[in-house]
Structure formats: C-alpha cells, structure tokens
Image (cartoon, grey):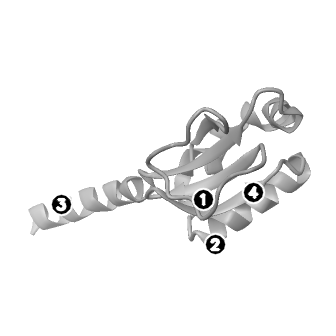
C-alpha cells in the first residue's frame, strides 16, 4: 500500500509539468517594428518572471525568416507583433498587434482562459 501511495504522489507531482510541457507563447516579429520594440521595453523583461511566463514561455520568430515547423496556425500571421498561444503544437488563440501594457495582460488572460490553462497552478 505504501508503494501505491508513493507512486500516486509522484504522478501528481509530474502531471502538471507534463501538461505544460508543450505550451508556449510565440511572438512573430520583424526588424524595425516599433510595436515589437515597445513590447520589448515594457514587457519582455517582466514576462519570464510572471506566472503566465512560467506556464507559456516566450519563443520568437521573424515573420520573414521561416516559420516554426512544429506549429499548426489557424491562419497566416500578417502583423507584428502577433502573439500566438500554442498548446501541443496547435494555435489556441492570438493577440494581433501590441495594445500597450495595460491591455496586453487582460488579453493574454483571456487567451489562457479559453485554452483552459491554469496560471495559478504555476505558482
């Protein structure tokens, strides 16, 4: 019985990590994008320290230099920055453009809710 409980507890510790293993926030950017630069100034240094950043770490790609091959997009990305929430290689939502710091976080929260990602579990 003790071995069963130990195995069960170990599984409970590993499951949340496994559930998030393939979750990330993909940022499409391009050289000279002023909104990308503003996002970098206001958010990029904060994002990895947030619960959102722990659940969905940021990955970047240049809009004109080859797209990630491991992601299935709902539709093409045309604007920079575009933030695409990816879970298990599939787009779950996006923010097109950078609306400023005051609107970015609530919009990101909506993406997490729609994808049923529990940000509180990251803490």
User: Which residue bears the numbered disc 2?
Assistant: 114
Q: In this view, does 106 lie to the left or right of 102?
A: left
Q: Quadrant of residue 4?
A: bottom left
Whether the residues at callouts 1 and 2 have beta carbons within 8 Å, the answer is: no
Query: Which residue is more in the foreground, 83 or 6?
Result: 83
User: Which residue bears the numbered disc 4?
Assistant: 95
Q: Disc 4 to disc 1, how far (Cα)?
A: 18 Å
Q: In which quarter of the image is residue 109?
A: bottom right
Disc 3 crowd rating (10 Å Cα; few below 14, some 14-19, many 20+) is: few
Mark 2 or mark 3: which comes first in sequence?
Answer: 3
Asked if residue 8 shows in the view, the reply is: yes
Mark 1 or mark 3: which comes first in sequence?
Answer: 3
> SS class of the residue under badge 2?
helix
User: Which residue bears the numbered disc 1?
Assistant: 119
Whether the residues at callouts 4 and 1 have beta carbons within 8 Å, the answer is: no
> SS class of the residue under badge 4?
strand
- Residue occupying image coordinates x 43% and y 52%: 22
Where residue 32 appears, as percent x and y from the top left, is 83, 27
Q: Disc 3 to disc 4, how far (Cα)?
A: 40 Å
Q: Disc 2 to disc 3, how far (Cα)?
A: 32 Å
- Residue occupying image coordinates x 87% and y 34%: 38
User: Which residue bears the numbered disc 3?
Assistant: 7
Disc 2 crowd rating (10 Å Cα; few below 14, some 14-19, many 20+) is: few
Which is closer to the viewer, label 4 or label 1?
A: 4
Q: Is residue 15 left or right of residue 74?
A: left
Q: Disc 1 to disc 2, how far (Cα)?
A: 12 Å
> SS class of the residue under badge 3?
helix
Query: Which residue is more in the foreground, 103 or 1?
Result: 103
Which is closer to the viewer, label 2 or label 3?
A: 2
Numbered label attached to residue 25: none
């Amino acid at each position: 019985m003790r071995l069963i409980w130990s195995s069960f507890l170990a599984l409970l510790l590993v499951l949340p990590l496994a559930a998030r293993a393939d979750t990330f926030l993909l940022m499409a950017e391009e050289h000279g994008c002023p909104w990308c630069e503003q996002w970098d100034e206001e958010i990029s240094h904060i994002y990895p320290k947030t619960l959102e950043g722990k659940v969905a770490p940021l990955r970047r790609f240049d809009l004109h230099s080859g797209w990630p091959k491991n992601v299935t997009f709902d539709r093409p990305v045309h604007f920079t920055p575009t933030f695409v929430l990816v879970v298990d290689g599939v787009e779950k939502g996006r923010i097109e453009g950078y609306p400023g710091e005051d609107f970015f976080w609530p919009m990101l929260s909506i993406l997490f809710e729609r994808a049923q990602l529990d940000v509180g579990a990251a803490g």
